Image (spheres, grey):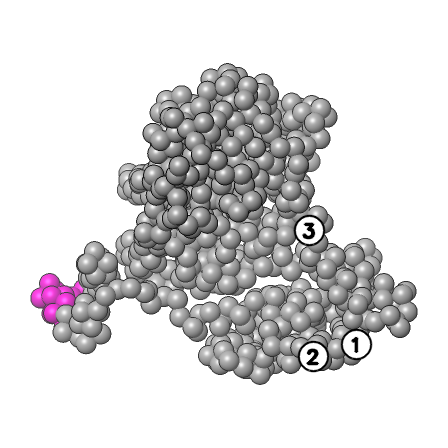
């Protein structure tokens, strides 16, 4: 018993170390969404209102986008304690990352309760999640899904507890509700997971009408959300509708191409029979859904879009592949209901991601991590059972995984700053500090929007007073096709939309800030900010008299 | 330098776990021999710029197991793929999964034979990454048989199904039939035009 507690604590220690080590510095820079969450937390903490002056909102507007509220409210205590910086913004996510490792341990104990060596399986699951590249990446940045996945998994765990003591149903519903407040995707994912749970355990759940009432009572915290949706329908989906396959023109393009290839001589009814929206959308959805189970995404290339890309590797380790195959091959031979639950949980997890047009997406399909690592732990355990005399089995698993972990850490700490620092808006802190030093004496500061929305970084790194911001801000109400809004100016800062150096008005007594090499060195350069590889990230200059 | 030291420690720790029944002097001898082995000497002498885990076999393997390749698009070479459909129908996918399930859960000789054939075919096909489509035949053939095993399993369980389940299966095959018609339309009408357009 003592040995198990010791091993568990060691795993948690490892998980905490990997999540908190140089948290403010890696990922390098601060993503615009992280800055927005942080500044809104700062603003609500200072004034009770967000950056748009809305009191204690249930959806946070930024960049024309609407963000769910839980992250901001969780960041607030960190900002109150440590001030507004990268560490405070990422702290709740790292903390919930560690808690997720604790949770998967207990979840595995619950799911594998009928297996004699359930302790070993739970330890493997916790260890693998602790060193998981996918989970580490999402735990070290403020990207919403870390919280969502934790609360969804906690909801599953509490539901399983509810099968024994019914009051846990209310806590389970509460947890699922928090997941809904954490991420828009959960407005689909959580109901799907709940549906799987209810279908799986229908005999116990529906045995007593009281269970249904207790479960429903936990959703009471969703009432303010329903009220907010009633008042402002944007609260329901936020930017999700701009990301949907139904909003994207890809399927329309395919249909147009197919109908064109049929030619004008073709019978219109026949053309419609072959090429119609329901069939094309169904195919598109299934294609995107299956992409999340492709070996390319899982083990070789991973996510290819910023900022979730880990260069040169998948979202899982290559070594996970044989163990996942073993797990899938053996899990249905075990006539244990809980084991099969994992597979169904796995199957519903990427549904939300498949409804969006940028696939495969490691953040939107992040719900996969819990069922995947539970499966993986089962696969490794099954494999280890072939060698009953083997000792130090957990240590052996760790040692076998070490080169893969080493490779991931090398990519994360050495190659991401080298290869994709711009995707994390590296250099913004230094840039804002330099602007602060140089701006006195200049009438205006004009900033390019090429390297990310500049206003949010100015607000964040200057800890700009929200009241002053509300007074001077000029919001551009036009929303782009991808759902982006724009801030034209505040204070002495001007940020022309679609900044083009050739087209903007050039004046003396104005400080200009541009991205990379979009402007040559013909002007009076006051400061250059560099990426870690020595490339120019930003230039600060003015026109010489 | 750190990577080299870590790698050495990793080998030493692995050896310690694997060779734990050996005495200390044998363990030390292992390390001495390791230090004299050409690949390790070369590893120590050359800069560690790229890692050895990402290999062409792995990448080609993922192409062959990609659902996009199998069910939606096929090869990137338009002469070997219509681009609008894969090499298997989407409706075959559930039956392929059922086929795998059947052969592996029943675990009879034929099932094992099929599974091993599929695996060997897949691995060999992945080595010939330049002519993916032709090489894919190596595992397409057993996959087709696995699909048929799934179909057979569905057929055998059909009689035991409820009316509702039978209607669902009927609807599923109707969709499958529709997909077949659409494929032949693409094959005969779209594909020649696409090849001409390049």
Q: Nearer the viewer, residue B137 or B98?
A: B137
Q: Which residue appears at 41% of the width and 60% of the height?
A: A312
Quarter holding residue B153 = bottom right
Q: Which residue is mark 1?
A: B189
Residue B179 placement, left or right of A433? right
Number of residues whose C-alpha sits closer than 10 Å to that of mark 1, classed few (under 14), some (14–19) or many (20 or more):
some
Separation of residues labelled 3 and 2 (CA atoms): 27 Å
A474 to A250, vertically: above or below: above
Mark 3 element type: loop
Residue A294 placement, left or right of A4? right
Mark 1 element type: helix
Quarter holding residue A425 = top left
Q: Which residue is mark 2?
A: B195
Q: Do marks 3 and 1 share a subunit?
A: no
Number of residues whose C-alpha sits closer than 10 Å to that of mark 2, classed few (under 14), some (14–19) or many (20 or more):
few
Q: Which residue is mark 3?
A: A248
Q: Which residue appears at 38% of the width and 48% of the height?
A: A521
Residue B32 located within the stretch drawn in magenta: yes
Q: Do marks 2 and 1 share a subunit?
A: yes
Quarter holding residue A232 = top right
Number of residues whose C-alpha sits closer than 10 Å to that of mark 3, classed few (under 14), some (14–19) or many (20 or more):
some
Numbered range of the magenta stretch: B21-33
């Amino acid at each position: 018993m003592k040995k198990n507690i010791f091993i568990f604590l060691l795993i948690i220690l490892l998980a905490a170390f990997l999540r908190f080590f140089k948290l403010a510095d890696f990922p390098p820079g601060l993503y615009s969404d992280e800055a927005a969450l942080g500044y809104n937390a700062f603003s609500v903490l200072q004034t009770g209102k967000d950056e748009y002056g809305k009191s204690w909102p249930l959806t946070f507007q930024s960049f024309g986008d609407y963000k769910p509220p839980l992250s901001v409210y969780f960041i607030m205590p960190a900002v109150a304690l440590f001030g507004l910086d990268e560490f405070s913004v990422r702290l709740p996510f790292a903390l919930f990352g560690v808690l997720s490792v604790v949770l998967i341990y207990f979840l595995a104990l619950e799911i594998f309760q009928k297996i004699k060596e359930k302790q070993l399986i739970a330890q493997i699951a916790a260890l693998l999640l602790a060193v998981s590249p996918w989970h580490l990446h999402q735990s070290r940045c403020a990207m919403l899904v870390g919280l969502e996945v934790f609360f969804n998994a906690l909801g599953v765990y509490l539901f399983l507890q509810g099968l024994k003591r019914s009051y846990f149903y209310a806590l389970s519903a509460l947890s699922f509700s928090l997941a809904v407040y954490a991420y828009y995707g959960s407005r689909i994912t959580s109901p799907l997971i709940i549906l799987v749970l209810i279908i799986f355990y229908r005999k116990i759940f529906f045995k007593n009408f009281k269970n249904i009432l207790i479960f429903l009572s936990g959703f009471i915290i969703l009432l303010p959300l329903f009220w907010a949706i009633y008042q402002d329908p944007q609260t329901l989906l936020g930017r999700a509708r701009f990301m949907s396959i139904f909003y994207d023109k890809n399927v329309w393009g395919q249909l147009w191409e197919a109908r064109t290839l049929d030619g004008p001589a073709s019978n219109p009814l026949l053309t419609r029979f072959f090429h119609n929206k329901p069939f094309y959308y169904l195919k598109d959805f299934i294609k995107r859904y299956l992409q999340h189970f492709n070996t390319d995404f899982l083990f070789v290339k991973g996510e290819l879009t910023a900022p979730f890309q880990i260069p040169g590797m998948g979202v899982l380790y290559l070594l996970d592949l044989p163990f996942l195959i073993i797990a899938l091959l053996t899990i249905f031979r075990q006539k244990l209901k809980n084991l099969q639950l994992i597979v169904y949980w796995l199957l519903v997890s990427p549904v939300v991601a498949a409804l969006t047009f940028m696939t495969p997406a490691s953040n939107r399909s992040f719900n996969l991590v819990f069922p995947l690592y539970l499966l993986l732990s089962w696969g490794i355990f099954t494999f280890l059972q072939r060698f009953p005399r083997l000792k130090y089995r957990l240590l052996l698993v760790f040692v076998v995984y070490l080169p893969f972990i080493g490779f991931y850490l090398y990519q994360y700490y050495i190659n991401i700053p080298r290869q994709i620092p711009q995707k994390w808006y590296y250099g913004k802190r230094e840039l804002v500090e330099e602007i602060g030093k140089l701006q006195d004496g200049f009438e205006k500061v004009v900033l390019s929007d090429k390297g990310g929305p500049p206003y949010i970084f100015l607000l964040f790194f200057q800890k700009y007073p929200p009241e002053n911001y509300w007074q001077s801000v000029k919001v551009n109400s036009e929303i782009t096709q991808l759902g982006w809004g724009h801030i034209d100016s505040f204070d002495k800062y001007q940020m022309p939309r679609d900044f083009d150096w050739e087209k903007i008005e050039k004046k003396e007594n104005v400080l200009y800030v541009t991205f990379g090499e979009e402007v040559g060195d013909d002007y009076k350069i006051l400061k250059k900010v560099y990426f870690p590889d020595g490339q120019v990230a930003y230039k600060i200059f003015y026109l010489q008299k | 330098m750190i990577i080299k030291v870590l790698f050495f420690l990793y080998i030493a720790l692995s050896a310690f776990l694997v060779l734990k029944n050996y005495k200390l002097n044998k363990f030390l001898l292992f390390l001495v021999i390791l230090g004299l082995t050409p690949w390790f000497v070369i590893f120590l002498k050359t800069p560690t710029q790229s890692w050895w885990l990402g290999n062409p076999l792995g990448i080609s393997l993922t192409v062959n197991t990609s659902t996009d390749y199998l069910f939606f698009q096929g090869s990137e070479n338009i002469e070997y793929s219509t681009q609008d459909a894969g090499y298997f129908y989407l409706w075959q996918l559930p039956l392929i999964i059922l086929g795998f399930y059947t052969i592996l859960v029943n675990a009879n000789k034929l099932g094992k034979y099929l599974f091993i054939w599929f695996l060997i075919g897949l691995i060999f096909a992945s080595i010939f990454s330049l002519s993916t489509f032709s090489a894919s035949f190596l595992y397409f053939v057993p996959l087709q048989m696995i699909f048929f095993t799934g179909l057979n399993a569905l057929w055998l369980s059909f009689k035991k199904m409820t009316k509702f389940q039978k209607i669902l299966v009927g609807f599923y095959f109707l969709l499958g039939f529709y997909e077949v018609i659409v494929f032949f339309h693409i094959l005969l009408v779209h594909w020649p035009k696409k090849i001409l357009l390049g």
